[in-house]
Amino acid sequence: MSRPILQLKDASIYQGDSLVLSNVNVEIYKGDFVYLIGKTGTGKSSFMKTLYGDLALKDGEGHIVDFDLKNLKEKDIPFLRRKLGVVFQDFKLLIDRTINDNLLFVLKATGWKDKKEMDTRVQEVLAKVDMKTKGFKFPHELSGGEQQRIAIARALLNNPELILADEPTGNLDPQTSVEVMEVLQDINKNGNTILMATHDYALLLKYPSKTLKCDENAVYEVVQRKN
């Protein structure tokens, strides 16, 4: 069996000195689409932040895209994040530049040098989220759903081994949420591995997949009933 892209073993996750999740055991393999659910305050965001190096893993073992989370050093974090694609609830687009320039900024920051290659890559990821004609626009000229598509395109720029989507539909209306979810589903079908934190249970019913739940300081797999 192939090695997991993400593996946590007897891990404890802290926010400051407060224990948020204990004895976490999780494995995610290439091509998986996994939901992370739970009420507000149960640790979903802390779980995600630990995976991309925002919170240190103090107890247990954790490996993600060949990085050891327990021994992750400050200087390693940019390299870890190059192998991850992170999609946030609030898009986090730079409002003072066009969509194309938002994406070029990320490529420059992650070490790309060749202008032609960069322009080509920007067009490729915009095509994947059906936003190829919007590159000249500024974020405020796009709807929320369009901005989230751009955020997904940004996450794809460096061909990440794992996409972490933290409440990607949290600020969107139901119809737009479905549209964004269709984009994520297509990306997953093309081989990208996705871990998506959400509290939108309608999406879980519409697109059933492996589901992890945060509850009472624990993370466990939920078995979804077949209709």
Image: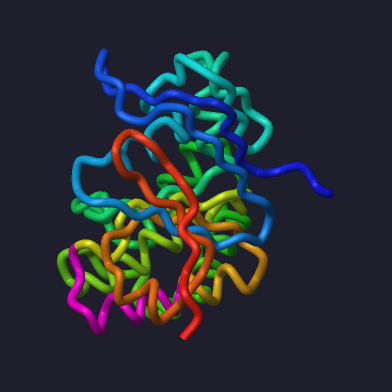
Vertical placement of residue 169 versus 165, above or below = below
* Residue 213 versus residue 184 in the image, above or below: above
Q: Position of residue 45 (x, y in %)?
A: 31, 41
* Helix, strand or loop for the magenta stretch, by majority: helix
**66 left or right of 33 in image:** right
**In the rendering, at what x and y percent does residue 24 appear?**
49, 33
User: Which residue is at a point 29% across and 38% down the rendered structure image?
Assistant: 216
Mark yes or no: residue 93 visible: no
Span shown in magenta: 171-183
Q: Is residue 227 above or below residue 104?
A: below
* The stretch drawn in magenta includes residue 174: yes
The location of residue 111, given as percent across then percent down, is 57, 36
Residue at point 61%, 53% (across, down): 159
Q: Is residue 12 left or right of residue 161?
A: left
Extreme-right residue of the structure? 1
Q: Quadrant of residue 13?
A: top left
Query: Relative to 77, is 167 on the left or the right?
Result: left
